[in-house]
Amino acid sequence: MTIVYNIFYNLAKLLARMFFSMRVIHPERMVESGPLIIAVNHSSFFDPPLAGICSRRGVYYLARKTLLKWPFFGPLFPAMNVIPVERDGNDMSALREVIKKTKEGNAVVLFPEGTRSLDGGLQPARAGIGLVIAKTGAPVLPMRIFGAYEAFPKNAKGLRSTQITVVLGEPIYFTPAEVENPSRENYQILSNRVMDAIAALKIE
């Protein structure tokens, strides 16, 4: 972790505990070394840091390129492992960087749904995460965040204090046969498998 990453990592942990009484179910399932895709449902602006603080190592994130223009925080995002992506999400250069970072043995947080949910419910998976799986062969750690939508949904006017629970699933390991077909259809199949694993996670 960079110094900047470490500062915001610990700050995010502190705030998650103070404001949201955050608890993590099955933290032992986190893969702490080697290439990893952390696949998370997406319903809140808080989802990236909530997912990141579940790992003891630094992880990489995709974030809209426009965020780098924010005063103060914008210049700090690269030191926080942010990979900038164009707003429409169809940014192949960003995907190539995700693939590169994953192949180098890093963990990357990805949202199979592609965009935040408007009602907190799960959305269909897009093919992007399947492409990354096929190109890297990396295992996927399914993760589901409960309560983040209630705390800070899309287009919210303010923050609400509520319980947040993060559930980690068993890592998914893909066989060479499952990832060898470089087609959009297969990418979608892989994405759907990951989304099904996220949907199956419940608060125990």
Image (cartoon, grey):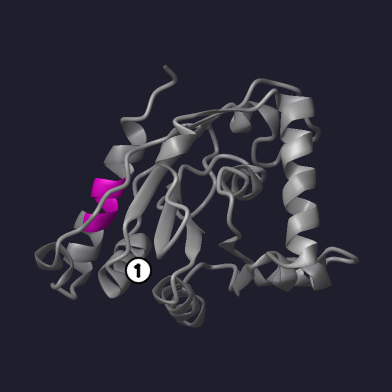
Left or right: 161, with 64 as reference point: right
Percent position of residue 201, x then y? 36, 29
Q: Which residue in the rendered view is the most extreme toward the left?
A: 177
Residue under the image location 13 percent in, 72 percent down? 181
Which of these two is toward me, 16 or 68? 16
Percent position of residue 82, x then y? 64, 67
Percent position of residue 89, x then y? 50, 67
Left or right: 42, with 175 as reference point: right
Q: Which residue in the rendered view is the most extreme toward the right?
A: 72
The segment highlighted magenta reads 190-194
Residue under the image location 59 percent in, 68 percent down? 87
> Which is the main secondary structure of the residues drawn in magenta?
helix
What's under tag 1, amino acid-wise? Val
Residue under the image location 18 percent in, 67 percent down? 179
Q: Secondary structure at mark 1?
A: helix
Which of these two is toward me, 132 or 105? 105
The stretch drawn in magenta includes residue 36: no
Which of these two is toward me, 29 or 144? 29
The stretch drawn in magenta includes residue 192: yes
Q: Which residue is mark 1?
A: 132
Q: Residue 54: which quarter of the image?
A: top right
What quarter of the picture does the N terminus occupy? Answer: bottom right
Q: Residue 99: which quarter of the image?
A: bottom left
Percent position of residue 131, x then y? 31, 69
